[in-house]
Amino acid sequence: CDSKSLHIHVMVENVVLLGGGGCCCCLFVVFVVLMIALGFKKVESSQWALQYDWWSESVKKEPLTQAGLHFVGIGNYLVTFPSTSKYCYFRNFDNSFQPDDDDVFMPPLSVRTSDGLKVTLELEFVYRLQMAKLYDLYMLVGDTGYRNTLVHVAAAAISAHATNFSAQAFYGDRGDVQGAFQAALAQELDRVLYITVVSFQLQPAHFPPKYAAAIVETQEMKQDIQVAEQENKTKVIQKQTQLFSARQLAHQIIIKAEGEAQQTLVRNQADVAQFKYRQQVLAEGYSKALNFFSSGGQDAVPNFLNYMKVEALKAHNSGQRTVKLTPVV
């Protein structure tokens, strides 16, 4: 009986040892799978990333730009940066405005102009990180420190170049000021932080109350002057139009009068020519008639008159009137 109990006890111990070994193997497999799974990190479509090696405490220079899962190793992780364009605001917005997480939102900048006037500027610009310079940017300011550095560099560049312009330029030549600010900011951010400025927008400047009131008054006076000049131009154009119309009418009258005078002259000349021709023909006819009847002596004139009566009778319409001829004795 004792030998049977000992045999059973040994068998139980063997089963326990085998079960314990199996559990250890399962736990080891789960641990390995978990470590491998933790070695995969995801890069979003709007991100670039640098691989940080925890064991060597270093960052690989080559950035990861393809979206998806990447195996970086156990204990390692990714330092992510935005791959899309982001905004940097120096503006006053109401509570309804909600910037993105990667955007920078700061209050307006106070600067000095070339004539010493304090001006408050509201502006915004779109920037983008340079993929090839991510490692250099990380080594310079870390993974998130570039935003604070971006604000300081941008504010310093704008403040320094604001002294190149007078207060009048900020409300009269804002386009030129904006172009100069964009060029200076792009050069400075590219040199210091390896950041590209995509676009830049300068809003109307805010001046001290007295200066702002003087600007309003000046603008009103300029507007009045412009209105007066425009009215003067309008009246000049109207008078020029009237003068042109009067000249055109006078020219038309002259042309019409000259035409009528020429027409009258031609008509008179034609009438005179016709009259002269008719008189000449009549004179020639009378002369021929007298010559023809001159052979009759004293009877020439009576014979000529009889001839005229006969011709008149031939030309007369006998159906309408009766003509009585009285022979001359």
Image: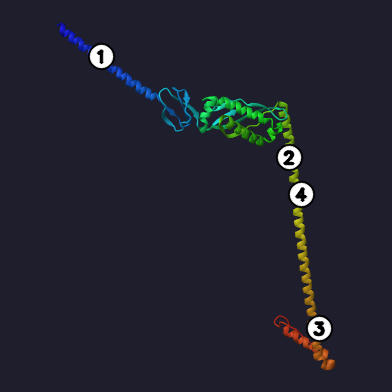
Q: Label 3, secondary structure: give it.
A: helix
Name the residue carrying label 2.
226
Inter-mark Cα distance, 4 to 2: 20 Å
Mark 3: give few (<14), some (14-19) or many (20+) Cα within 10 Å.
few
Above or below 82: residue 23: above
The mark that comes first in sequence, 3 or 4, is: 4
Name the residue carrying label 4.
239
Percent x, y for residue 169? 70, 34
Question: Mark 4, mark 1: which one is toward the viewer?
Answer: 1
Q: Which amino acid, mark 3? A: Ala
Query: Which quadrant is the C terminus positioned in?
Result: bottom right
Q: In which quarter of the image is residue 323?
A: bottom right
Q: Label 1, secondary structure: give it.
A: helix
The mark that comes first in sequence, 3 or 1, is: 1
Q: In which quarter of the image is residue 278?
A: bottom right
Mark 1: give few (<14), some (14-19) or many (20+) Cα within 10 Å.
few
Inter-mark Cα distance, 3 to 4: 64 Å
Inter-mark Cα distance, 3 to 1: 170 Å
Label annotation for residue 17: 1
Percent x, y for residue 255? 76, 62
Q: Which amino acid, mark 4? A: Lys
Name the residue carrying label 3.
283
Question: Mark 2, mark 1: which one is toward the viewer?
Answer: 1
Q: Residue at x 75, y 51 (%)?
A: 242
Q: Can residue 269 be seen in this view?
A: yes
The mark that comes first in sequence, 4 or 1, is: 1
Q: Which amino acid, mark 1? A: Leu
| Cβ–Cβ under 8 Å for marks 4 and 1 | no
The mark that comes first in sequence, 2 or 1, is: 1
Mark 4: give few (<14), some (14-19) or many (20+) Cα within 10 Å.
few
Q: In this view, does 307 lie to the left or right of 82?
A: right
